[in-house]
Image (tube, grey):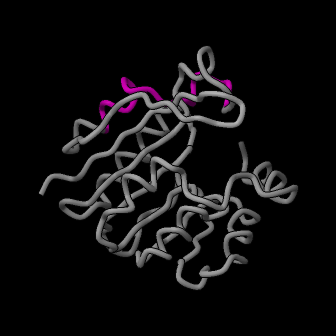
């Protein structure tokens, strides 16, 4: 989708909950705050949540309407908001402790390019968290994009995981009001 398409979606109504994704909150909530980037931040729900925990957060998205929604929320002053396409955004000004990529769906080669760059932005010991719809969600889950070319899988994220000390690389279940969705999770750290 183009930035203009997302701007139209964000103009209609809130697209997602204001609360962080449960699994993201579980994994990140116990970390000591540091510097973080939320790539493809959308309305900034994770960026705002992280800032509330004391993280110094940069939220990056190409949809100005989504970022504007985030900037209108309480606590938004604690987040650095950057309107940029993640495919062309050069990098944060300094290396970071956490790079969050939540439900960013691009063709596999573009996903690999973004994530390879993201690993390079991490400090030694810095964490990468990638969570998105799994390709098997089309046939065995509910919701999400229906184009298998842009969905994640353990196999598709394995080349990125090979550059990390991996805690988890797996398909995970997510309960929704419509039923069970299947996601792919990559949770690892840059070697020290």
Is 22 or 46 nearer to us in this picture? Answer: 22
The answer to whether 66 appears left or right of 162 in the picture is right
Query: Could you say where residue 88 lies in the image, as x and y percent from the top left?
Result: 52, 56
Residue 148, horizontal then vertical, whole percent: 59, 22
Q: Residue at x 53, y 78 (%)?
A: 80
Tell which residue pokes out farthest to the right in this image: 12
Q: How many labels, in total? A: 0
Quadrant placement of the C terminus: bottom left
Q: Is residue 77 above or below residue 69?
A: below
Residue found at the far top of this picture: 139
| In magenta segment, residue 66 | no
Decide whether the magenta segment is chiefly helix, strand or loop: helix
Query: Furthest-left residue in view?
Result: 192
Q: Residue at x 49, y 61 (%)?
A: 38
**Percent coordinates x, y for residue 16 in the rendering:** 70, 52
The residue lying at 73 percent from left, 47 percent from top is 2
Judge from the rendering whether residue 102 lies leftward or rightward of residue 29; answer left or right. right
- Above or below: residue 155 compared with residue 67: above
Seen at 56% across and 71% down, the residue is 48
Rendering coords of residue 102 (x, y %): 52, 49
Q: Which residues are magenta?
A: 145-160
Figure quadrant of the N terminus: top right
């Amino acid at each position: 989708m183009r930035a203009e398409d997302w701007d139209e979606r964000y103009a209609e109504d809130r697209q997602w909950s204001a609360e962080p994704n449960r699994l993201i909150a579980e994994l990140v909530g116990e970390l000591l705050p540091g510097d973080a980037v939320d790539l493809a931040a959308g309305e900034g729900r994770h960026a705002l949540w992280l800032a509330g925990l004391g993280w110094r957060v940069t939220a990056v998205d190409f949809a100005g309407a989504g970022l504007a929604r985030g900037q209108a929320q309480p606590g938004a002053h604690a987040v650095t908001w950057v309107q940029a396409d993640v495919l062309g955004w050069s990098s944060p000004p300094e290396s970071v402790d956490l790079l969050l990529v939540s439900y960013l769906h691009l063709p596999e080669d573009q996903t690999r390019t973004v994530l390879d760059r993201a690993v390079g932005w991490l400090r030694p010991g810095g964490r990468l968290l990638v969570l998105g719809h799994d390709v098997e969600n089309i046939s065995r889950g509910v919701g999400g994009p229906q184009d298998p070319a842009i969905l994640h899988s353990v196999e598709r994220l394995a080349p990125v995981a090979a550059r990390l000390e991996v805690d988890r690389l797996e398909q995970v279940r997510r309960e929704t009001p419509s039923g069970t969705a299947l996601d792919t999770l990559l949770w690892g750290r840059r070697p020290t």
